[in-house]
Image (cartoon, helix red, strand yellow):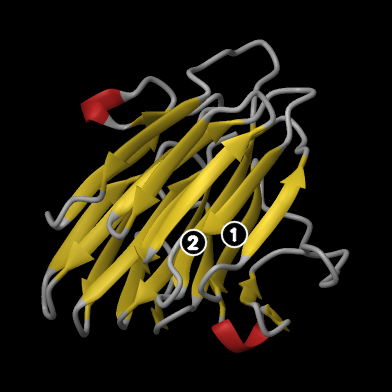
Amino acid sequence: MITCRTAQQCGQADFGWLQARYTFSFGHYFDPKLMGYASLRVLNQEVLAPGASFQPRTYPNVDILNLILQGEAEYRDSDGNTVRVGTGEALLLATQAGLSYSEQNISSSTPLTRMQLWLDACPERSNDRVQHLSLSAQPHQLLASPDGAQGSLQLRQQVWIHHLNLPAGEQLTLALNGPRAYLQSIHGTLSANGEHHDGQKLTCGDGAFIREENRLTLRAETPLRALLIDLPV
């Protein structure tokens, strides 16, 4: 089935320096029924004010994927490593035990807008600590995968993440590797239809739980950017 979770149903935060929308329980937002979905632990959209930062903190054993939608961020770990990522780029951090990480909007005038995902990492897998790539303007890009296929970022988990960039009226059908997936509209309106159940319409900021579908057909009603997170495990 396809079950919509609208942007209005998500957790919200406005701290002045940070505005956020939380799909799953995070920080002050807690819902015991929404602690994640399969290995997807966190799916946030956050806006950091110019010059704002997240102070150093440690993380559980997760892969953190950041998609920069606007602005430029600097990430630093407690070993002294730094990386800068700007608009239209994706950064994957393979968190390490004992290391802390910080994030700063390095612009003094432009907000930093990004999507952030946390995915449980298999403890026996070890990948590069930092990977990044540019988001494609093509209709479909395999953004992350377990084996780095098609030049994608390599995850420490059996998950495939697709970045979609469709003009209005275009349709795309994708096969799924297992019984679960999550669909997230970054901006734009789309219809999502599976093989076995009635479809749903999503608009900017909406998401949808996908269950027991082998294939998913997406049609952009307006210019669309979206993520499809294939979660067979």
User: In terms of image quadrants, where is residue 34?
Assistant: bottom right
In the rendered structure, which disc, 2 or 1, sits on the residue that comes first in sequence? 1
User: In terms of image quadrants, where is residue 107?
Assistant: bottom left
Residue highlighted by disc 2: 115
Could you say whether the residue bearing mark 2 is in a helix, strand or loop? strand
Nearest to the observer: residue 39 or residue 43: 43
- 38 sits to left or right of 196: right
User: In terms of image quadrants, where is residue 211?
Assistant: bottom right
Assess disc 2: are there few (<14), some (14-19) or many (≥20) residues with their C-alpha within 10 Å of its C-alpha: some
Task: Where is residue 18? Give x, y as percent.
Answer: 64, 76
Label count reads 2
In this view, 194 is above or below 180: below
In this view, 95 is above or below 170: above
View extreme (bottom): residue: 8
Determine contact: label 2, label 1, CB under 8 Å. Answer: yes
Nearest to the observer: residue 213 or residue 182: 182
Mark seen at residue 43: 1
Task: Where is residue 214? Give x, y as percent.
Answer: 39, 47
Kind of residue indicated by mark 1 = Leu
Regarding residue 135, the answer to whether it shows in the image is yes
In this view, 204 is above or below 80: below
Distance between the Cα atoms at labels 2 and 1?
Answer: 7 Å
Kind of residue indicated by mark 2 = Met
View extreme (front): residue: 108
